[in-house]
């Protein structure tokens, strides 16, 4: 990848990379090549975790995710500095987790919500992997926003920076031309000066989304992301949550309408099959979900809330086991991360067809990076 800003600049904190210009993507001079984002249920050659916030606030969750994913997929962990790297190693060693299939890469980042800002690994017409760098939060989370560029430098992947905001948690694809999102994606890009047809055109060209189904977000849920209530398990099957109307009448209707909309969709294999799973209660203001899952090559990491909803959790687990025969369904307690605004899918990023991972040099930075956000502030920060 040609880096016009210089490697050293990208490794320093809080250097804002200029956003690409719209005219570069539309009109006669626009690039004609098309790309495709594989599905998360497709083979995965890496799973990304961001350590900074997670090590400090959710060490148990960090250990559980690494322990469950490592036997099935290489786990790539972002660290800000040498101290953070050593902290992660000591934590994993204390739980007797082997180091094989684990990789650490020194890239500045602010938060643990790597799904939304991490690189989306797509395939070009020559089937070579590239990293898509959508816009994120350039005001308060500068380092998060620049992670795809730093990741491209470390892996020597070509990086394409896009003029649209596409949070990873708000774009799910079946890998065969169909993607689902919520109205929030269109609204956010309207605020950036894009017409809806421009946003959809970029999703088609760079994410392979020839058909984009725009759904309603959950009413009152802060992120407005589709991964809070849906997930693909195959190219022609999508799982959608279902609320008990007695607990949440408004969102029961929202999800019923979304399910009905998806049932009208046709895939390359015929009509899209919609399967419903229960949604956990959120009467205490904490938005829990069973669809915020992580696909790991024959294993599925599923959030659970054993103290709040043991019955619903078992029902969701049984449904995923039925839909994914031969898969290992691993339940991970996500109650604490739910209090911060997400679940398992939110704090991981599938690296899909990234290819052979390079040997990453050990982190060399010996002092923690200055951050626009303190660790204390992070504990109360929602991922949007």
Image (cartoon, rainbow, N blue to C red):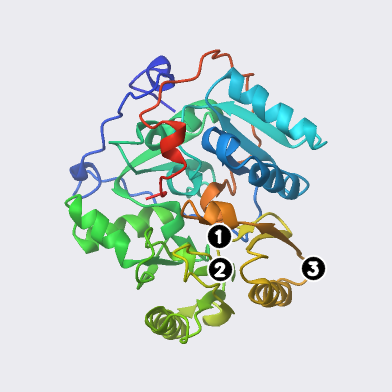
Q: Nearer the viewer, mark 1 or mark 3?
A: 3
Is the N terminus in the top left, top right, bottom left or bottom right quadrant?
A: top left
Q: Which residue is mark 1?
A: 39
Residue at the spot 46% in from the left edge and 82% down from the top edge: 259
- What whole-number distance in Å separates the C-alpha atoms at marks 2 and 1? 8 Å
Query: Could you tell me which secondary element the residue under label 2 belongs to?
Result: strand
In this rendering, the answer to whether 73 lies above or below 176 is: above
In this rendering, the answer to whether 329 lies above or below 373 is: below
Query: Could you tell me which secondary element the residue under label 1 belongs to?
Result: loop
Contact (Cβ within 8 Å) of mark 1 with mark 3: no
Q: Is residue 271 visible?
A: yes
- Rendered location of residue 5, percent (x, y): 33, 20
Contact (Cβ within 8 Å) of mark 3 with mark 2: no
- What whole-number distance in Å separates the C-alpha atoms at marks 3 and 2? 17 Å
Q: Which residue is mark 3?
A: 326
Q: Which residue is mark 2?
A: 232
| Mark 3 Cα-neighbour bin, 10 Å: few <14, some 14–19, many ≥20 | few
In this rendering, the answer to whether 352 lies above or below 178 is: above
- What whole-number distance in Å separates the C-alpha atoms at marks 1 and 3? 19 Å
Residue at the spot 52% in from the left edge and 56% down from the top edge: 338
Query: Could you tell me which secondary element the residue under label 3 belongs to?
Result: loop
Q: Nearer the viewer, mark 2 or mark 1?
A: 2
Contact (Cβ within 8 Å) of mark 2 with mark 1: yes
Image check: 348 left or right of 172? right
Image check: 97 left or right of 118? right
């Amino acid at each position: 990848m040609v880096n016009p800003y210089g490697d050293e600049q990208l490794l320093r904190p809080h250097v804002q990379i200029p956003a690409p210009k719209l005219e570069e993507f539309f009109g006669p001079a626009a690039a004609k090549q098309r790309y495709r984002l594989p599905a998360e249920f497709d083979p995965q050659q890496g799973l990304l975790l961001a350590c900074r916030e997670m090590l400090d606030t959710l060490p148990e969750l960090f250990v559980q995710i690494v322990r469950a994913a490592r036997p099935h997929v290489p786990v790539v962990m972002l660290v800000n500095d040498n101290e953070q790297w050593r902290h992660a190693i000591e934590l994993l060693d204390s739980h007797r987790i082997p180091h094989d299939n684990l990789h650490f890469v020194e890239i500045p980042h602010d938060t643990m919500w790597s799904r939304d800002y991490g690189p989306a690994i797509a395939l070009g017409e020559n089937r070579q992997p590239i990293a898509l760098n959508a816009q994120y939060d350039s005001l308060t989370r500068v380092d998060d926003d620049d992670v795809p560029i730093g990741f491209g430098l470390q892996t020597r992947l070509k990086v394409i920076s896009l003029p649209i905001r596409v949070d990873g948690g708000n774009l799910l694809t079946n890998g065969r031309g169909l993607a689902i999102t919520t109205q929030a994606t269109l609204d956010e890009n309207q605020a950036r000066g894009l017409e809806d047809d421009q946003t959809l055109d970029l999703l088609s060209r760079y994410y392979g989304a020839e058909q984009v189904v725009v759904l309603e977000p959950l009413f009152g849920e802060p992120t407005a992301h589709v991964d809070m209530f849906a997930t693909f398990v195959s190219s022609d099957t999508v799982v959608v949550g279902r609320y008990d109307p007695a607990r949440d009448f408004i969102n029961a209707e929202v999800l019923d309408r979304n399910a009905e909309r998806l049932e009208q969709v046709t895939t390359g294999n015929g009509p899209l099959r919609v399967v419903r799973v229960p949604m956990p209660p959120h009467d205490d203001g904490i938005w829990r979900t069973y669809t915020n899952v992580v696909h790991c090559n024959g294993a599925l990491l599923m959030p659970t809330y054993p103290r709040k909803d043991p019955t619903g959790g078992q029902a969701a687990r049984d449904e995923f086991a039925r839909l994914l025969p031969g898969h290992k369904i691993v339940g991970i307690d996500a109650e604490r991360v739910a209090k911060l605004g997400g679940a398992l899918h939110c704090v991981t990023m599938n690296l899909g067809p990234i290819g052979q991972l390079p040997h990453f040099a050990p982190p060399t930075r010996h002092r923690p990076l200055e951050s626009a956000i303190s660790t204390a502030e992070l504990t109360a920060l929602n991922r949007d």
